[in-house]
Image (cartoon, helix red, strand yellow):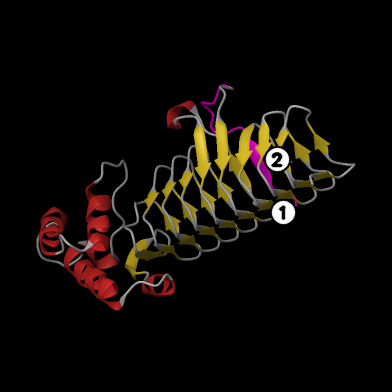
Amino acid sequence: MTEVHQTAIVDASAELASDVVVGPYSIVGPRVRLEDGVKLHSHVVVEGKTSVGSRTEIFPFASIGQPPQDLKYEGEESELIVGSDNMIREHVTMNSGTEGGGLITEVGNNCAFLTGAHVGHDTKVGNGVVLSNNVMLAGHCIIDDFVIVSGGAGVHQFTRIGKHSFIGGMSGVENDVIPYGMVLGNRARLAGLNVIGMKRRGFEREQIHALRAAYRMLFAEEGTLRERVEDVAALFSEQQDVMDIIGFIKAETSRSICMPRAAADD
């Protein structure tokens, strides 16, 4: 049974599915859809053309679906899509998209957005992602599945963060981060592989050994990165995890690849 607190303001045009809870002083706009089991605690604002997936829980003072923070935005209709089973904690902000990014900001399933995290316009967040307190994602970022971004980190616009990677606290990330990578620092440098994360996700020892071997080859001192990529692709062609990294590096992008400090300084 859907429950709306008497102090909440829910527009008559909003769509509320079954078992939705809207807490005290929360506001739900006219183009919002809340799927089954969504819970809004007190003082939550959900506006714009926004859909929130089943069983997602949003905590006080979060602001979801407001217009993008982009000076080029001229009021065109844009959208925010939030998946299922997400935890969105206090003071989190998520903005809708812009014309330059397809007019859609998307968040996957089973994510955790801790206090004060921000998801910028046109950003795509995958499944199982964790944004710790006060993480800042600029516009047009792509955050793949099972990424962890530690507290206070900032991610530059148009940056890609590959799956299963780990961003250290207070890092300033201005270049693309390879899948399974770990980056630290301001400005962030690649500091190895997220081995702990892979173990927690049940990766086999052989998978991790292959990734470590490929990593050493990719970021060795001999030859160019392009040459090393081709060598690794040939040697590990049957190792899908390694080929995920190769595909990520080869993909067209506006950002450089985040490199280890020694390699970047060469």
Kindly identify the amino acid type of the residue bearing the numbered disc 1. Answer: Phe
- Residue drawn where x is 70% and y is 55% of the image: 90
Q: Which mark is residue 17?
A: 2
For numbered disc 1, what is the local secondary structure?
Answer: loop
Name the residue furthest right: 6
| Spatial CA span between label 1 and label 2 | 19 Å
Q: Which residue is mark 1?
A: 59
Q: Where is residue 261? Give x, y as percent.
A: 29, 65
Of 59 and 71, nearer the camera is 59
Q: Residues within 10 Å of mark 2 (few under 14, many from 20)?
A: some
- Residue drawn where x is 25% and y is 69% of the image: 211
Q: Quadrant of the C terminus?
A: bottom left
Q: Residues within 10 Å of mark 1 (few under 14, many from 20)?
A: many
Q: Earlier in the sequence, mark 1 or mark 2?
A: 2
Q: Where is residue 73? Give x, y as percent.
A: 54, 26
Q: Magenta segment, which residues?
A: 60-74
- Residue 247 lies within the magenta run: no
Residue 166 higher or lower than 127, as above or below: below
State whether the magenta stretch is mostly helix, strand or loop: loop
Residue 260 quadrant: bottom left
- Residue drawn where x is 48% and y is 37% of the image: 122
For numbered disc 2, what is the local secondary structure?
Answer: loop
- Residue drawn where x is 39% and y is 62% of the image: 165
- Residue 73 lies within the magenta run: yes
Kindly identify the amino acid type of the residue bearing the numbered disc 2. Answer: Ala
| Residue 237 appears left or right of 174 | left
Q: Which mark is residue 4?
A: none
Residue 200 higher or lower than 68, as above or below: below
